[in-house]
Amino acid sequence: MTVNKRKLLLGTLLAFTLSGFAQKKTTLSAEVYGYKREMVYFDCLQSPFFNSEFHTNPGDEHLYSFESKSPVCMLINGQVNVFMLPGDSVHAVVRYDGKRPSEVVFSGTAKAVTANRLMNGIDDMKRQMRYKGQLLACVVVDVKPQQRIDDSRTLLAKVQEMVAKEKAQLSDVAADYILANTEAAAYVSFMEYPPMYADTRKTPIKDQGIGDYWKLMDGVKLRSSVGALCNPDYVSFLMRYCFYENEKKANAKHATYTMPQQLEDMFKELAAFYQGEQRDAVLYQLLVSFVRNGKELERAKPLFAEYKAKYNKNKEYLDILEKLME
């Protein structure tokens, strides 16, 4: 091989390599029709630093590219979820009928498209089931606790079937994210709705027809996968599960348990209950929520130092918290 040919080959390989790196950006694009507000917003559930905004103009393509190292779920106008792995490219055509999207069509990276179509289909199914996202809304219309629990179990079973059917076309991370999202909704209903209903409707838990409240979560296996722990709703469920289990233990001993209300007490209890990646995720979410609230940041500093020194495993969590606390 001549020197010139070697240079040409090396140049070609370098070009392909650089092209590959250039294509690793994660990209969300969208066309939005029928939307009456002035601005279209892209926000990220996992990081406050991935976001963009555009002036509403039907037919325009709103394009946002960014470098991500972990899975993200972007929100379009706070209403349309778009799940993406690093390097994915997804285009969404969103059509509004009034204040809510009436149709969303996805295209782009094949497995990402499958995941987002599935998530959109699950949202449609929940609407058909009249499965409310807010438990207080269930209380308002007097959904009985047993009905909510039955509906939650039905939802879980249906979503498990849907994910299994699409398994070959889904990434494992996306499958875990979707299952974890549904489990969070169902399990929080098991833990929170009976006492909420008892407080507001004045019907004691023992008279709600749900059986033993303390057995509702028996057999539940907690997830610790990347897909599950990048889901904020699932991490919130893990927090609530810690307090439920600690109250359950106290109840078995006929002792009084008070759920922690202060940041410091919550941090201490969660840190003692969980290990490894689960502990990292719940403490990060606790701290990032408090810091983003923008009040009493001095209270977060010693806890952040403890988290950084003893519990942090995901360096992206650390980067985000350090930037927020600057």
Image: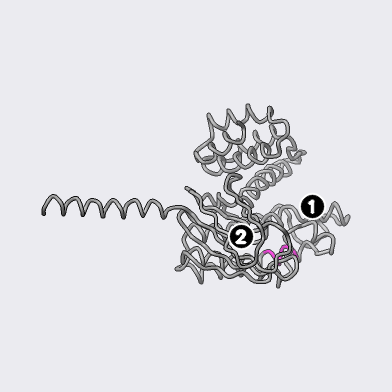
Q: Is residue 267 left or right of residue 160?
A: right
Q: Which residue is mark 1?
A: 195
Q: Label 1 is placed on what type of residue? A: Pro
Q: Secondary structure at mark 1?
A: helix
Residue 20: percent from the left, percent from the top? 36, 54
* Quadrant assignment for the N terminus: bottom left
Task: Give the camera-side residue of 203 and 288.
Answer: 288
Mark 2, secondary structure of its residue: strand
The image quadrant where one finds the C terminus is: top right
Residue 265 part of the magenta segment: no
Out of 256 and 18, give the one closest to the viewer.
18
Residue 186 seen in render: no
Residue 308, placed above or below residue 275: above
192, 42: nearer the viewer: 42
Q: Amino acid at mark 2?
A: Asn
Residue 309 rendering spot, x and y as whole percentages: 53, 29
**Residue at image coords 15%, 52%:** 4
Residue beneath the point at 57% across and 68% down: 118
State the image coordinates of residue 230 (x, y, percent, origin top left).
55, 50
Magenta segment boundaries in residue numbering: 148-152
Q: Which mark is residue 34?
A: none
**Snapshot quadrant of residue 321:** top right
* Residue drawn at the location 81% of the way across and 55% of the way down: 205
- In this view of the protein, which residue sits in the foreground, 165 or 319? 319
Relative placement, left or right, of 168 versus 54 is: left
Q: Residue furthest right?
A: 202
Query: Which residue lies under the disc numbered 2?
Result: 81
Does 268 sit above or below residue 158? above
Q: Residue at x 57, y 55 (%)?
A: 73
